[in-house]
Amino acid sequence: HGQPIETDVLIIGAGPAGASLASFLASYGVKGIMVSRDSTSAETPRAHITNMATFECFRDIGLEDILRNVSTPIDETDHLLRWCLSMAGRELARRYTLQLTPQRAGEYKIASPCEHMDLPQTRLEPELVRYATLNGFQVRWDTEFRTMEQGDSRVTVDLFDKVTQQIFSVSTKYVFGADGAGSRVMRHLQVPMEGFPSTQWAVNVFLKADLSHLMKSRPSVLSWVLQPHRDHADFNMVCVVRMVKQWDEWVFSFLPAPGAKEELLSKEQYLEEIQHVIGDDTPVEITHMSRWRINEAYAAHFSVGRVFCLGDAVHRHPPAMGLGSNTSVQDSYNLAWKVAYVLQNKANPRLLDSYSLERQPVGKHMVTRTNEALRRHVPIFEILGLVSPSVPERLEALSLLSANSKTGEQRRTDFQAAADACVETELNGLGIEFNQDYSNSPAICADTSDSAPAKPALEGNPDPVRFQTRTTIPGWRFPHVWLNKAVPGKEISTIDLAGKGKFALFTGIGGGVWKEAAAKLSTDLNVPIRTISVGYGQDYEDLYGDWARIRGVDSSGAVLVRPDNFVAWRHGKAEGDEIWATEKLNLVMRKVLALD
Ligand code: FDA
């Protein structure tokens, strides 16, 4: 124990949550320390589907193109999901990839200027660490969190250096627990985890095998391989095969047979099983094996005093719907501007209370829905007879799929309906990706227009998990719309005009008073507020008319957007001079930044 190292920010964990937080904070010029008990970033792919809402966060700090370059575009893979009897064997059903589902493709294009990408953690994390370190963050590997003590203005954290085998201390203004599903920070804080205890575990085997001869004609990101003809003491009949790199890197996720011991088997045992799952003699090289648990748990709250937790530390769930690292990145995007504004004296520290209030309901909903999505696969096993105890019974049940009988007909209908039900949530969760509602947060100010709609934002949305609600109601994600310049040039998205560490105020013809008010308050409050006027002859034009359709205010009205691209407030129209507008906007900014 020497003198503690002094910093403003200590991030514990360098996974998607910690490393993205370091990057977003660094984009604000905030410097700090990030520690990880591992020696390097993720060595197995794990999370991979990276959705548009997450890419919007990376786009905001200029990382989108870099990350695209190390991703596989989803549309190259055509299909996300299929069910088959082995990789080489019969296919029973397939479903298109996300935005390629012909019936839904347009909605994905409308939702965002970004695209879904297949971006494994092995490629995401190094880029985030690189960005964070190049922009002023220190990263210390082999450094484990041990304990901490919170004082009135600082937290003292004890860390164990695994290289020198010494404990050292860090004195910091804020601590961020991004230490994953086994979070020691959360245990230390004694925050209750709600949900259900985990009952299921699985093994991921990461391997190299050139399956292009099988996959080129039936490409898919995920294959659910069902093997009713196999009876094994260690392995369940279901193996989920996930493409990491087309078509020679894979993760095979094995579920254990009922009653199997929770431990890894030998490489040889996995190799033998893998060969059955592939269904031919393609050479296989196993590179990594790991155990993991399927969880259904979320923290009752995400912060205690000066400690804020994010990512799997506070929401633990199965990979279904691919929301884990996406939600982790969005947690950190929500936190970063608040922390930066507080450290730069632009906001009161009470602004940080809004983090847990805004993100805990999102985490809870995601944990519940991803578990429901996973359970939607169970009817498939029942319909195909996989739940029968003996091989002959199972094979007979499967043969009904091709039987020329009433029962066969019913089985085929039921099976395709069950596959659709899986796909509806698993693939088409555009709503769960975008429909976060922070309207009850203290960092949001309700619509102050006389004609503020009393209707809830989700009215008319038939399924908020599947369908996006695009609105400027305060507390909702600011919608993407293409705008144009009067002179020839590229279209620009509304979300690119907002963000970048600033508040953005959108107005239009007749809304000049808002521009004056925003300029005055930017100076008075020392908070950057960019103003954008949209309409004929304004800063940007709305040639498609989409902005006018979605803005929810008159052309002289105002839509104020937070730096994290959520609508902070809106007002229907300009009803007075710039003094009136400044008073109105001042009240709003003070509420959002907790300055009163
Ligand atoms: P994560 O676990 O990634 O990182 C924790 C960090 O904390 C590590 O750096 C670790 O070293 C560090 N740490 C832990 N304890 C520490 C201590 N005491 N001291 C210091 N450091 C410590 N998600 C998704 O969005 N799309 C997907 O497609 C999938 N697919 C998927 C497949 C499979 C098979 C799995 C198991 C998981 C997924 N996920 C997913 C989920 C995803 O992997 C998970 O949600 C994220 O990794 C969570 O990121 P975190 O940064 O919160 O934790």
Image (cartoon, rainbow, N blue to C red):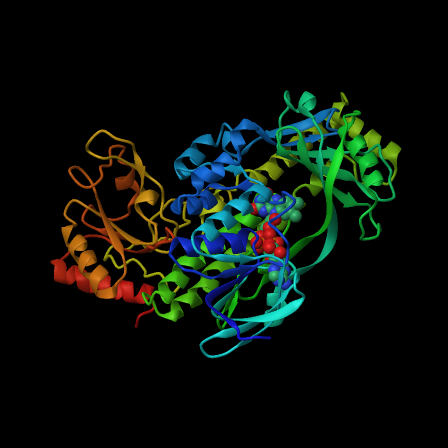
Image label count: 0
Quadrant containing the N terminus is bottom right
Which residue sits furthest left?
577
Q: Is residue 3 above or below residue 86?
A: below
The location of residue 519, given as percent across then percent down, is 19, 57
Task: Judge left or right: residue 11 versus residue 234.
Answer: left
Task: Judge left or right: residue 509 versus residue 437.
Answer: left
The location of residue 262, given as percent across then percent down, is 80, 53
The location of residue 256, given as percent across then percent down, is 79, 46
Q: In this orientation, does residue 432 appear? A: no
The location of residue 536, given as percent across then percent down, is 17, 37
Q: Residue at x 50, y 79 (%)?
A: 151
Q: Nearer the viewer, residue 24 or 565?
A: 24
Q: What is the quadrant of residue 120 in the picture? A: top right
Task: Judge left or right: residue 443 versus residue 484.
Answer: right
Q: In this orientation, does residue 103 appear? A: yes
Q: Nearer the viewer, residue 584 or 277?
A: 277
Q: Residue at x 33, y 67 (%)?
A: 345
Q: Residue at x 71, y 36 (%)?
A: 207
Q: Residue at x 45, y 60 (%)?
A: 358
Q: Is residue 375 above or below residue 418?
A: below
Q: Is residue 503 above or below residue 549?
A: below
